[in-house]
Image: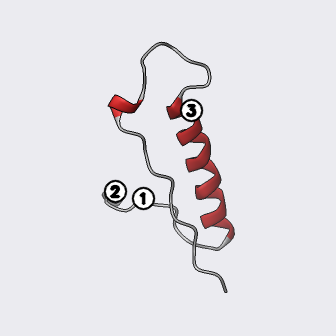
Amino acid sequence: MNPPPKPPVKPEDWECCHRGCCPCIFDYYWDALERWQAAMRERGLDPVLPGTPPSL
């Protein structure tokens, strides 16, 4: 079995030009995050980002 995919790297705030681009660099990130979460669920894994506190 292949290792689980790595989560996408969230852009830093300074990497966004704040001009209202469509799509924005953060739009690409959120799309990639959704794909990563779906891939993790398909493997039966919990799609929690490293460093995120567990939900209660």
Placement of the C terminus among the 4 image quadrants? bottom left
Q: Amino acid at mark 2?
A: Thr
Characterize the local packing of mark 3: few (<14), some (14-19) or many (20 or more) Cα atoms within 10 angstroms.
few
**Residue position marked by numbered label 1 in the rendering:** 49
Task: Rate crowding at label 2 as few (under 14), some (14 to 19) or many (20 or more) other CA atoms within 10 Å.
Answer: few
Tell me which label, 3 or 2, sits earlier in the chain: 3
Find the distance from the CA under tag 3 to the CA under tag 2. Answer: 20 Å
Q: Secondary structure at mark 3?
A: helix
Instruction: Residue 31 in the image: state x and y as whole percent.
Output: 61, 41
Determine which residue is flagged by label 2.
52
Where residue 41 sits, quadrant-wise, is bottom right
Identify whether 29 is placed above or below 22: below
Amino acid type of disc 3? Asp
Q: Contact, CB < 8 Å: mark 2 with mark 1?
A: yes
Query: The residue tagged with tag 2: helix, strand or loop?
Result: loop
In depth, the one of 11 and 1 nearer the eye is: 11
Q: CA distance from mark 2 to mark 1?
A: 6 Å
Q: Which circle marks residue 27 in the picture?
A: 3
